[in-house]
Image: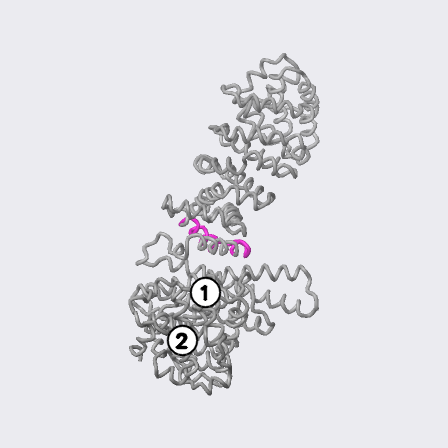
Amino acid sequence: MDVEKLSCQSSSLAPVAEAVPSSSVMEDCLKLLRGETVQSSALTEGCLKLLREEPEFRRLAVLLLVAKVCQDKDDYYCIIKVYLTLGLQFFLRLLRTGRKAGRGDGACLELSVTELAAFCKVPKIAASSRLLHVIPLLMQILYTGGSVSPSGTIEDCYYELLYLVANAQEDGVRVLYESGGIGILASQMPDLLLVGSNNVVQYAVELVQLMLTKFPANETFIKHPSELAMLVVEASRIFGLLRTDDVKFKVSTLRFISLILCSQRSAPVKEALRSLQKVSRSTVWLTNILSGVVAILNSAVTPDDKLQALFLAESTISVVGIQWLIGQVDVTKGPFLSDWCILLENCRVEIVCLLNDFAYLRFEASKSTCASSVVMEAMTSMCKDLSMLLYLVRAVMELISNKSGDGGAHEDLHDPDAAPTSSDYCILTKITSALEETILFVLNYLGDAKEHGQNRGDDLLASVELIAKYLELASDGYLLEILDEASVPLNYMLSVLGNDEVCPVMSTGALLPLINVIVMGNHAIRDVFVVTSGALEGLVKSLLSFIVPTSMVEDVSLMFCYNCCCILLIFLEYCPKLRSAEVDVSLFILLGPVSRWAVKTNNMAIILMASSLCALILASQFEKDVLCYLELNPDLLNPLSQVISRSVAVYARASDVPEEDDHPYLAKGCYQLAFSHFKYCGSSWVERLPSLKEAIERQTEGSEAWQLKDKLD
């Protein structure tokens, strides 16, 4: 038994003990209360006899004596005998009595809770099914504010008793949850942080963890998003403001917040946090989480805890965006760079470890025709972890790029002319070095996946997005060096899909800005990255595989087709020498599917993009050359002529052209590129393709659009 927790009752119950008729046992009791020593061998049996007597006040007095006698916490035999002698009903009566108002009843409540918490440290007692009745009573007391006490020790006992009983038996968590556990604990947390001890907060946190881990996630996260969001906000105060030397408690809080925010079912909680952020406009909890994450990464904790801190950072970014990494610090002073450096260095270490472990598991799996479920599960978990780490690296990299731009330098991590300020030079040098090493590891990882014929996975998609963003910011010299060393062609990266994607929307979108930079830039880089990669053929194949069987015009297909068309427009406009017989075959095959896809919609952005692409494919081509590859039948000419004629009409009436900002699918500059190519629909272009000319004239007969075609030449 915990004698210290019972000592607060000694003074209040001493008069009761003195009122008991004199006996040798009670004399020993009074000696103990006065701090004198007695022999406990015969005293225990005497106590048990007194506990069997009827008067309640005598039992209360003897309970103090038992606490003094059973000072050895491992004396489970004696404690169990005392508990069985009293019976659970005795404590339940005290609890129910204590719920009433009155100073004396409050003392009974405190005594019963204190004693039960001490008894329940014996596992056999805590596992008693009858003790489940205690949980609803305690939750009602907590809900009505019954735990408010000048003694922090008594408050500890409330939460300790709840935890011991709920954790000792299977139905304990269910009863706790059904008694309103999450809501009540969420409402109590602010007061606990103000007046409670670390032990109280720890027990409250562990109680919530029990419900989240042992109760169905669909139930807890969907029904209680607001309560869980409030728990995250309150727990962040402990996580961020706790003294850094109290590492154990900080790690415990990290695991608690991560259990909520990093869960696959956390979407409702994240939405509740966003709503809370809009209403309160307070960023204190975000600053606390950032402070706590950095403190964990700087502390001597286990690698798993550091990895968990990085996952928490990634989850927080998914709630409020990458600007969270700036925190509440003055951006012009830039001390947050050290935080970025810490995050990036820890990410680099974890990524290297994960890639090495994953390569080993992939090698083990390749040796047998049927990999074990354990190996496959481990590989799946590693892919998920790697995806989150790569996302975090990309977020830091984007912030560094933005800071370079804010400072007036080029947004270029490797350009010597884009030197950082003197105060940040050392930190930026470390960051750049860590990024370079990380990129090389990720490129090797993608190369390994390509060799094994794998192109689906959030980890692969995150790798492509990271590399695309990094190379987009790199200088020409460094970019050429990286591309020479890389064994990952553009064709492969354009084919990478996320776990839930039906077409490579995200990878094409991520690579589009990079391709734009490369194609319009250094010719040597263009040859390495584009000409030798087979990217054109691969892109056309990917586009055909999606458009032909579906002809869909939903948002996902629009985004993907826009990305592909933008890339092809850039190739055809700035790299005309890339066209070969093989490329022409692929491009001519595109004419029918793209025009049929575009003619199904009234979205003018689609029509402009499709007609521009078709115009570039047919530019400088004669009909006899086109007939070598495909048949100019009505199935092709009708949709193609419709798309072109509608584009001519829009081009003739420039006021009808929509703004580029109205079409988020279009990359910057691609809209104007598409619009500028409608000049190819003029007479000089059509004269070389008489069959197409006739089809267009049939489509535009009697309309103003074709009469304005001379303005397009």
Q: Residue 79 falls in which quadrant of the image?
A: top right
Graded by Cα atoms within 10 Å as few (under 14), some (14 to 19) or many (20 or more), the crowding at tag 2 reads some
| Discs 1/2, front | 2
Q: Position of residue 324 (x, y in %)?
A: 40, 54
Which quadrant of the figure contains the C terminus? bottom left
Q: Nearer the viewer, residue 566 or 457?
A: 566
Q: Residue 34 falls in which quadrant of the image?
A: top right
Q: Position of residue 188 (x, y in %)?
A: 48, 35
Graded by Cα atoms within 10 Å as few (under 14), some (14 to 19) or many (20 or more), the crowding at tag 1 reads some
Residue 237 in view, yes or no = yes
Q: Secondary structure at mark 1?
A: helix
Q: Amino acid at mark 1?
A: Leu
* Residue found 61% across the figure and 26% down from its top: 68
Q: Is residue 551 left or right of residue 656?
A: right
Residue 298: in magenta span: yes
Q: Secondary structure at mark 2?
A: helix
Q: Residue furthest front?
A: 702
Q: Is residue 264 above or below residue 196?
A: below
- Measure the alpha-carbon separation of dots 1 and 2: 29 Å
Mark number displayed over residue 100: none
Q: Nearer the viewer, residue 182 or 709?
A: 709
* Residue found 46% across the figure and 60% down from its top: 392
Q: Residue furthest top?
A: 21
The residue carrying mark 2 is: 698
Q: Nearer the viewer, residue 297 or 459?
A: 459
The residue carrying mark 1 is: 558
